[in-house]
């Protein structure tokens, strides 16, 4: 899958080569890339949940591609795709309990779907009709879409500190990328999480690229190993293996519920598409790397295993295809039907009680 | 003033069990200026606690704690040490209410010792108010007396929105009567602290007492100058500013911060917009200079002195 530098620890020019599971230690895995079991597949998901996981992944991919189309058609502003990361997002989001709270980046639409966020409201963000929280973050227990890199890590830790203070048996989960681990806020958040034994899951989707910079130029070490320095466990998993993702996240959440504090999960995955619709990965990335990543598709891997196990069959998959087509069409229609927001929204939530000067500026725009 | 601030924190912790006080050295030590002394002993280390040296972490944790329904009162140990937290403050603390269309408020109070005048080391005498005033979604207050320190801090903690409280460190040890209530001028209201009719000095924080000294000195020359303590730098009390200019016809703005784009620029602009026809002289600014805050040995050349301020008042009166 993943990074394909000419040598494992090369600092030189990247040369595409055989698919490689990233330099460094082997990730924990349940399913091999070809869909055969290499670990204990009983991760606590029954047949219905296993089917649901695959269906979420299929829906997420179809919707992701639709969003890119919508951007091309001028219906969305710049859109950050996540193709290739479906297992990492769906597996982790499914592992959380109803009371747990997610703090996302801007690339977690699949996780948002699983957590019950209305995709039309979510996509209001990319429609450009509102900022990070067009849905209700408290009701959905899914924080605002967060653009400033790594800042949401500290929010997730603070939220978890609040859970501890309240004695609530729940955790927060923070998504971030490999690039975010270079930010100071990653360090400050992780350090606070360790010091306060915060019930938080720090979930790094290491997708190999932070826009144009590969992971090995973000850090010379392994991300999961940093956890030791903060005083809590870190684990590297195959992020394209939904069962491994589910199990690791579930274990981390259970640790959090039990008062044992934070866990860092480094899920190795791959950003098959561009950083966003405004990005051209051809400028910095060899196509051969993407071809290799496609051969390591998280959905295919899981589907093969489910079929071999007799959990899904062709008829089910065909029925889902039709349902998903309809669902995505409905989402598309909901998105394009969204009107621009009323002008007064620009002023209405800056303060609880707008100061006089702001009220005057509001009148200046609205008249009257 | 330290005791008044301490009492405000204590009363807030007593009144609202969702209030938390945390920051660097605020727990066991009671804070480097002793503002939080005794609070951990009284309220326990769950509600009053020390954090790692981690300003972005402190501000970011306050955001997460607000999502979880907690009301954080955090301390930045010194003005210049608040800068690592600016990304969290500007991108999230200030904007979360707006980003979530009012669904998630940020009732966060960020206290910090501010301004110079104590012959401190570098990075210990900054006037960071413009950074915060320029950020929509924040309120910025600065008290000049122990009485107002109690009131403004209580009001800041109770406020539904984030408030930056700039505590003039040169005034920490000043004594004064404290009413220990929150009646009186609120956030957003300036206070006329000395009456006068020929000119108005607009100032705040550590410079208020100096401007009162100026008013005393000028009285001997039969120049009765009004002094306004702005108290709240955001939102500015434009009504009081305009009224005082209409009544006195002349204005001098005094602050420690560098002149360019300091608060004086905004006050002067509002005077021109709201009371131009009443001006009998150009608005004058007496401020710090556009240089980094100087070493202790040069501090007195940088800070607006009684002489500089009085000179500016004489100038606008004679114009």
Image: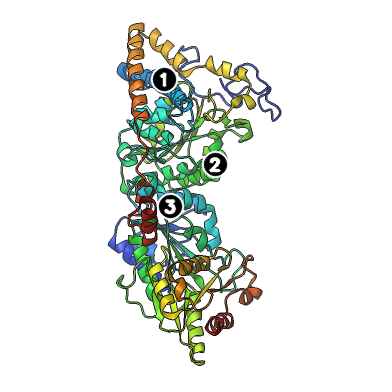
Query: Looking at the rendered structure, which numbered label has been put on residue B94?
Result: 3
Residue, far front: B277
As helix, strand or loop, the secondary structure at mark 3 comes to loop
Q: How crowded is mark 3: few (under 14 residues within 10 Å), some or many (20 or more)?
A: many
Q: Please state, as top left, top right, bottom left or bottom right, where the C terminus of chain A lies in the image.
A: bottom left
Left or right relative to A126: residue B182:
left
Say which residue label 1 marks: A62
What percent of the width, then of the height, locates residue B77?
50, 62
Distance of label 1 from label 2 (alpha carbons): 40 Å
Q: Mark 2 points at which residue?
A: A229
Q: Which residue lies furthest to the right in this view?
A: A12
| As drawn, B127 above or below A160 | below
Q: Residues within 10 Å of mark 2 (few under 14, many from 20)?
A: few
Residue B54 seen in the current view: no
Q: In which quarter of the image is the N terminus of chain A?
A: top right
Up the image or down, B203 lies above or below B12; here it is below
Comparing B20 with B127, the one in front is B127
Front disc: 1 or 2: 1
């Amino acid at each position: 899958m993943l990074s394909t530098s000419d040598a494992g620890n090369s600092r030189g020019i990247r040369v595409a080569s055989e698919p490689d599971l990233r330099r460094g230690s082997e990730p924990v895995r349940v399913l091999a890339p070809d869909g055969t079991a290499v670990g204990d597949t009983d991760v606590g998901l029954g047949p219905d949940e296993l089917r649901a996981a695959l269906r979420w992944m299929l829906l997420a991919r179809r919707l992701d591609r639709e969003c890119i189309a919508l951007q091309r058609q001028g219906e969305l502003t710049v859109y950050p795709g996540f193709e290739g990361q479906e297992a990492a997002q769906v597996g982790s989001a499914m592992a959380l309990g109803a009371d747990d709270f997610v703090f996302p980046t801007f690339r977690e639409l699949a996780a948002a779907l699983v957590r019950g966020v209305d995709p039309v409201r979510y996509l209001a963000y990319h429609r450009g009709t509102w900022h990070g929280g067009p849905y209700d973050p408290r009701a959905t227990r899914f924080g605002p879409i967060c653009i400033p890199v790594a800042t949401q890590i500290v929010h997730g830790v603070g939220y978890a500190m609040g859970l501890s203070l309240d004695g609530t048996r729940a955790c927060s989960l923070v998504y971030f990328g490999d690039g975010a681990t270079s930010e100071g806020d990653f360090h400050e958040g992780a350090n606070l999480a360790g010091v306060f034994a915060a019930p938080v899951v720090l979930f790094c989707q290491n997708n190999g690229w932070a826009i144009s910079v590969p992971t090995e130029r973000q850090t010379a070490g392994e991300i999961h190993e940093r956890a030791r320095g903060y005083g809590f466990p870190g684990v590297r998993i195959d992020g394209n293996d939904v069962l491994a993702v589910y199990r690791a996240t579930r274990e981390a959440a259970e640790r959090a519920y039990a008062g044992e504090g934070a866990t860092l999960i480094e899920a190795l995955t791959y950003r098959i598409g561009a950083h966003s619709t405004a990005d051209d990965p051809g400028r910095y990335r060899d196509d051969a790397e993407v071809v290799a990543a496609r051969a390591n598709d998280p959905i295919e891997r899981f589907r093969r295993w489910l079929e071999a196990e007799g959990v899904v069959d062709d008829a089910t998959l065909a029925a889902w295809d039709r349902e998903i087509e309809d669902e995505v069409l409905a989402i598309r229609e909901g998105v394009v039907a969204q009107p621009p927001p009323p002008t007064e929204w620009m002023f209405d939530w800056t303060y609880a009680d707008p100061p006089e000067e702001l009220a005057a500026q509001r009148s200046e725009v609205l008249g009257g | 003033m330290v005791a008044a601030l301490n009492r405000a924190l204590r009363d807030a912790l007593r009144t609202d069990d969702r209030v938390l006080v945390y920051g660097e050295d605020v727990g066991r030590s009671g804070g480097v200026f002793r503002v939080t002394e005794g609070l951990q002993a009284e309220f326990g280390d769950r509600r009053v606690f020390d954090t790692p040296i981690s300003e972005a972490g402190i501000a970011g944790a306050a955001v997460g704690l607000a999502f979880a329904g907690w009301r954080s009162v955090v301390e930045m140990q010194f003005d210049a040490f608040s800068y690592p937290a600016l990304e969290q403050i500007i991108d999230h603390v200030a904007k979360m209410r707006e980003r979530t269309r009012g669904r998630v408020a940020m009732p966060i109070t960020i206290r910090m010792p501010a301004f110079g005048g104590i012959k401190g080391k570098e990075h210990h005498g900054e006037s960071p108010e413009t950074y915060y005033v320029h950020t929509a979604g924040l309120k910025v207050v600065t008290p000049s007396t122990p009485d107002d320190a109690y009131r403004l801090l209580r009001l800041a903690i109770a406020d539904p929105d984030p408030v930056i409280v700039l505590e003039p460190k040169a005034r920490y040890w000043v004594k004064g009567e404290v009413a220990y209530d929150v009646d009186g001028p609120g956030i957003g209201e300036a206070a006329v602290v000395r009456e006068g009719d020929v000119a108005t000095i607009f100032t705040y924080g550590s410079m208020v007492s100096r401007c009162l000294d100026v008013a005393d000195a000028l009285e001997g020359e039969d120049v009765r100058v009004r002094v306004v303590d702005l108290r709240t730098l955001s939102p500015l009390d434009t009504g009081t500013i305009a009224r005082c200019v209409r009544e006195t016809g002349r204005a001098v703005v005094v602050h420690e911060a560098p002149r360019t784009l300091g608060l004086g620029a905004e006050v002067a602009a509002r005077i021109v917009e709201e009371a131009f026809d009443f001006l009998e002289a150009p608005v004058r600014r007496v401020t710090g200079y556009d240089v980094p805050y100087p070493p202790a040995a040069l501090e007195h050349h940088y800070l607006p002195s009684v002489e500089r301020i009085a000179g500016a008042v004489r100038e606008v009166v004679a114009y």
